[in-house]
Amino acid sequence: MRKKFICGNWKMFAPQWDGEIPSFSADKIVAVAPPFTELSRMAERLKGTGIQLAAQNVYFMDEGAYTGEVSASMLKNLGVSYCIVGHSERRGYFGETNEDCLKKIEKLAEFGIAAILCVGESLETREAGEEYSFVGTQVEAVFEHLSEAAAEKIVVAYEPIWAIGTGKTATAEQAQDMCAHIRATIAACRGADYAENVLIQYGGSVKPANAAELLGQDDIDGALVGGASLKPESFFGIVNY
Ligand code: PGA
């Protein structure tokens, strides 16, 4: 039985989590990904809440002259358990490739950090009817090469780019169909038993009002939440959908 996993992604926004942090049932996994500069403060703040600390990015080298980058061991030292990899904003603005994603996921696994691999198509790709092959290729580029250690921990987030920050959510059917396709692609790479246990989140304008329908789909195991995670009221409206 797969657990539901809800992760907040604060992107480059100032945190607004100063009030009380609501509770949630222990059968769910809950995490938040603040900006790097807030990780240590949030690590303190989240103590005893059951909420896991996530990072938004990592570099795949151990250390060195890589100005502006942060390593997996640095994240580990701050208590990070999950790290978003290949978010469409990183792929789009910072040129992150599938190969970069794979290297990052493997480096994170060396330090026991689970990657949340983001995949998803643009509106143009969907309108051209190429969304399944596009997302399938993103999934294969990682799952065909993943080490056992990294495969044990990885989570996938299906985030159609046209639904991110736009208020335009994929319908539950569109999201379910793509998450099922992702699971089938993973099964083709590594076997059906393995694929059955991989957590697949949906992300893109998830809010309290649409969480129950999206999270009620067979192949949707959680949500990656941007805008609606900035305030605890709306984030926990999703967590406790
Ligand atoms: P959104 O962002 O919830 O604001 O659409 C989702 C994401 O980018 O992870």
Image (cartoon, rainbow, N blue to C red):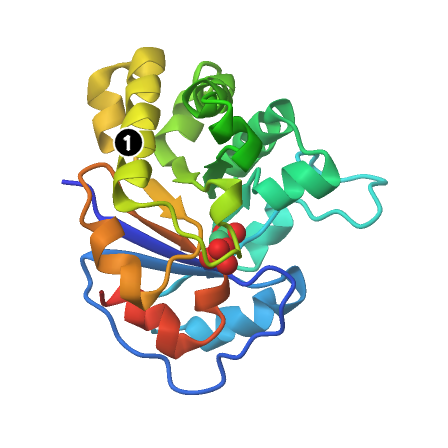
Whether residue 164 is situated above or below residue 199 in the rendered picture: below
| Residue found at x 21% / y 47% | 3
Q: Is residue 122 visible?
A: no
Q: Which residue is mark 1?
A: 177
Whether residue 184 is situated above or below residue 74 in the rendered picture: above
| Residue found at x 36% / y 63% | 207
Which residue is more in the foreground, 43 or 2?
A: 2
Quadrant location of residue 151? top left
Quadrant location of residue 92? top right
Quadrant location of residue 91? top right
Q: Secondary structure at mark 1?
A: helix
Residue 183, how many percent across, how many down? 29, 26
Instruction: Give the left or right position of residue 11, taking residue 183 as reference.
Output: right
Question: Quadrant where the C terminus lies?
Answer: bottom left
Instruction: Give the left or right position of residue 155, taking residue 163 as reference.
Output: left
Q: Is residue 227 visible?
A: yes
Count of numbered labels shown in the rendering? 1
Residue 112, how many percent across, how many down? 46, 41
| Residue found at x 81% / y 39% | 64
Residue at the outermost left position: 1
Under mark 1, the amino acid is Asp
Whether residue 9 is situated above or below residue 83 in the rendered picture: below
Which residue is more in the foreground, 206 or 109?
A: 206
| Residue found at x 44% / y 53% | 168
Question: Quadrant where the N terminus lies?
Answer: top left
Residue 221, how many percent across, how many down? 26, 44
Residue at the outermost bottom position: 19
